[in-house]
Image (cartoon, rainbow, N blue to C red):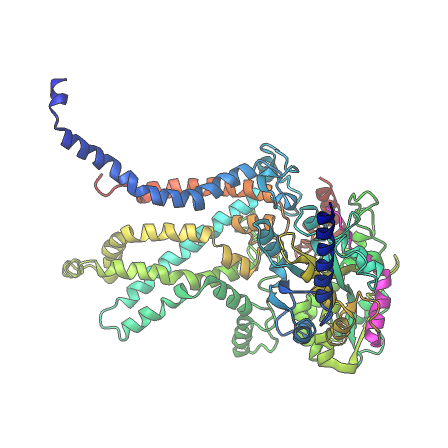
Amino acid sequence: MKKQFNLLISLILISAFVLTACGGGSGSTATGEVTFWHAYATGSAEEAALTAILEQAKTDMPNVTINVLQVPFNDIYNKYRTDVASGGGPDMFIAPNDSLGDDARAGLLADITELASGKLGDYSQLSIDGMSVEGKLYGVPESLKAVALWYNKDLIDTPPATTDDLKALMEGGTPVSLSYGCYHHYGFFGSFGGEVFDDSWKVIADQGGVADAMSYLNDLYQISVANGWPKNDSDGLAPFTEGQMAIITNGNWAMGDYRKALGDKLGVAPLPSGPGGAATPFLGVDGFYFNPNSTNLESALEVALYLTGKDAQTAMMNDAGHVPANTTVEVTDPLIQSLLDAFETAYVRPQVPQLGNYWSNFCGTDQVFEAGVPAADWVAEATANANK
Amino acid sequence: MASTSMIDPVKRRSDFRKVVTPYLYLVPAFLVMSVITFYPLIYQVIVSFTDFQTKDLLRGLASENLNQVGVQNYVDILTGGLPVQNFEFFRVLTYNLWWAITNVALHVPAGIVIAVLLNTPGLWLKRIYRSLYILPIVVPPLVVATVWRNIFDEQYGAMNQFLTNVGMLFGSIDPVRIRWLEDFTPPIPWLLPNGPLTLAYYAMMIANFWLGWPFMTLVATGALQSIPKDLYEAASIDGASGYQQFRNITVPLLRPAMIPAAIYGFTLSFNLFNFVYFMTGGGPARSTEILVTFAYDLVRNLRLYGAAAAFSVIVFFVAMVIFLITNRLTKATENIVE
């Protein structure tokens, strides 16, 4: 009995020494290799900021090797899914919470509720909610993203506050690069009082509002076509940064690139409100998600906490326009402050499977814009299809 | 009975070996094929009878959320019952067949005419032309599609700039701004009433023509060189004109080589995934979508794995019908000795 007691004491002492040794030194317990994927565009401000942060991480976290792979945004979810389903994949990846619900329910993301418990005190509740599905935490939030209206102060003094203002501006010939598409123009539904889902996630887009918004967007689209203005964010990038476009609508991930080109001339405002109220763009949360196959989950979490920590996020905010999820980051930039204001009316992206019904039925917008199907008919058909 | 017992046991063994040896040699290939070909095929057929989605990805067929839905996926596809907008199976099928047929109908005659011109005796630098014309075959279709998509860009594309310059010759000052890949209004509405042939279709025909004729020229050149010269000599002695020689000697003797080439071109165009996907992505409003790009969209964007599997099985049967018809025409799989 005494022998066993001695053994127990020795074990406790040894583990105490080991733990102390781990805790000391650099302050980081992360070891081994951590691989993560991101989808920041090559040559973008986001990518440059991340590279600088990772360079710094080599000093701050000397015991861990961080491997980074850039995967095009179009492929990142599918590549992750197929890799994880076959037992592989990176330790973690950073992406918007576009398919968080789907992937979490499919068991393709690790549940980190316990692992991260007590470690996310510095992050805003909104962003933590954005990483959670059915009460479980699946990621470390990094930043908030939504579509806003960016303008060139040299070309217009005040951004259009209402949908009528915007239309008048475009009719008057002020060049506007409006990004049409089911993600980018979602905010306009709110301006016309339209809702896609009811409380039980049934699609109710045909009950007014959405059709008005589509009809309004079609008017704007035809103006864009007649003037040869860009109709999506990637076509709009060059003309807007070269000062040919007064306005572009896009998410704040592009802010770094816009500011690099326009400097102080860049302004940002919410998407215009309309007869139905304020615009309701999708508010997404970018975050780090973890692979259930990872053998180094704790270190991966450490790295994610480092990359979303105060220093790293200050750099991401200032250099790449990320709106930090970490509330200890001091917002000094008026643009970031305007974005935070613009996000107040945004629609927090729901993590329900029914959201897929929106993507699979409301994205064929060229039926309205190009094929000339009346907006109300199109919305009615899409609604019926989604509720099949 | 007596005769069997008289057969030499050594000979019998060698007969046995003769029969078995080919199968033995085939075993490795069969093993490899069963893993990389048959297993996925069977798996896909099984998936096509389920509602397989992202939720089942991790555990596959063992997933407890997987529901057997019988032939529902097939019914949905054929009756337009999928929760997917703007999809009618038969419209896509008609367009797909039309796309393949019109491509071949352009590439084969053009290939032959160019081959005949290049075969003109005494033509200078013949070899250089021939190797130059192989270029489109060796450039990856992804690159070709991207380049052509840029050529047809509304604002910065070379095609509109070229047309602007042509217009200037005739005194026009306005820049040409044809929206090749976006405009939905069919320029010739009666051409294929079932599926609108948008400008994007014509743009793709132009681009795929660039991609397609060199192969036909290559085949035709080879066949032309195997036509004996004395046939032409004899014909010209008999007073046949150049056109008569072409019609009565060149064309009939080219046919055995060109028919398999045309069928190869047909199947290639029918399933020309990367070209269609990267040039128009099936747009505008799914008007240039072909069956394979649609199947891909079902998986990639809509994540309907079960429906996509059923779709692929249907595509397989469509392809099989085409194969059976063309096989009858070319006798491609017939044994040379038979």
Residue drawn at the location 84% of the way across and 59% of the way down? A125
The spot of residue A43 in percent (x, y) is 62, 74
Residue range in magenta is A331-353
- Residue B11 is one of the magenta-drawn residues: no
Along the horizontal axis of the image, is A380 left or right of B122? right
Residue B183: horizontal and vertical position, in percent? 62, 60
| Residue drawn 49% across the image and 66% down it | B143
- Magenta span contains residue A345: yes
The furthest residue to the front: A2
Q: Nearer the viewer, residue B41 or B63?
A: B63
Residue that extends furthest to the top in the rendered view of this protein:
B1
Horizontal and vertical percent position of residue B270: 46, 50
In the image, B66 versus B267, the foreground residue is B66
Q: Position of residue B18 (x, y in %)?
A: 21, 37
Instruction: Determine if residue A329 is in view.
Output: yes
The C terminus of chain B: image quadrant: top left
Name the image quarter holding residue A299.
Answer: bottom right
